[in-house]
Image (cartoon, helix red, strand yellow):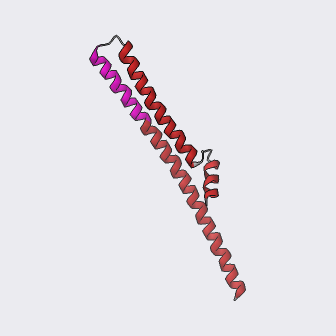
């Protein structure tokens, strides 16, 4: 079953499960670090008022949240396609197995 899953993922040009999970985790960590660094630099070097700086930080956080949601939706779509493809392969294998089993029973009776 693992082989079928791996083949389904590879056919879609997707990484294997653990590699994909690590990639997403690294992206999220990188995003968080980037947001923190950007916010810190903005506070240090921005000639803006406190209100303008707070709005800038809110806008940046909102953008990061929107990006994370988009990445989550993309991941969910890819996972759903992979699961559906795997389910179809399992179904086809089950039908083929049932058919093969039926042929054996008719030969033995």
* Residue 69 magenta: no
Residue 12 placement, left or right of 50: right
Residue furthest top as drawn = 47
Principal SS element in the magenta part?
helix
Where is 108 relative to 68, above or below?
Answer: below
**Picture coordinates of residue 63 (x, y %)?**
40, 30
Residue 30: horizontal and vertical position, in percent? 48, 31
Residue farthest along the left direction in this orientation? 51
The spot of residue 84 in percent (x, y) is 54, 56
Total number of numbered labels?
0
Residue lying at 28% horizontally and 16% vertically, measured from the top left:
50
Picture coordinates of residue 89 (x, y %)? 61, 61
Residue 49 in which image quadrant = top left
Quadrant where the image shows the N terminus: bottom right
Q: Is residue 33 found left or right of 91 in the rendered image? A: left
The structure residue drawn at horizontal position 71% and vertical position 86%, both measured from the top left corner, is 108
Q: Which residues are magenta?
A: 49-67
Q: Answer left or right for 3 relative to 62.
A: right
Q: Nearer the viewer, residue 92 or 1?
A: 1
- In the image, 54: left or right of 77? left
* Residue sitting at x 35%, y 26%: 59
Asked if the stretch drawn in magenta spans residue 55, the answer is yes
Q: Which quadrant, please, contains the C terminus?
A: bottom right
Residue projecting furthest to the right: 107
């Amino acid at each position: 079953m693992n082989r079928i899953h791996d083949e389904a993922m590879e056919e879609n040009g997707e990484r294997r499960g653990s590699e994909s999970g690590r990639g997403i985790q690294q992206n999220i960590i990188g995003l968080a670090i980037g947001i923190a660094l950007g916010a810190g630099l903005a506070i240090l070097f921005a000639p803006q008022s406190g209100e303008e700086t707070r709005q800038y930080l809110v806008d940046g956080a909102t953008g990061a949240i929107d990006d994370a949601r988009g990445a989550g939706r993309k991941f969910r779509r890819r996972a759903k396609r992979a699961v559906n493809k795997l389910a179809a392969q399992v179904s086809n294998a089950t039908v083929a197995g049932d058919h093969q089993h039926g042929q054996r029973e008719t030969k033995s009776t």
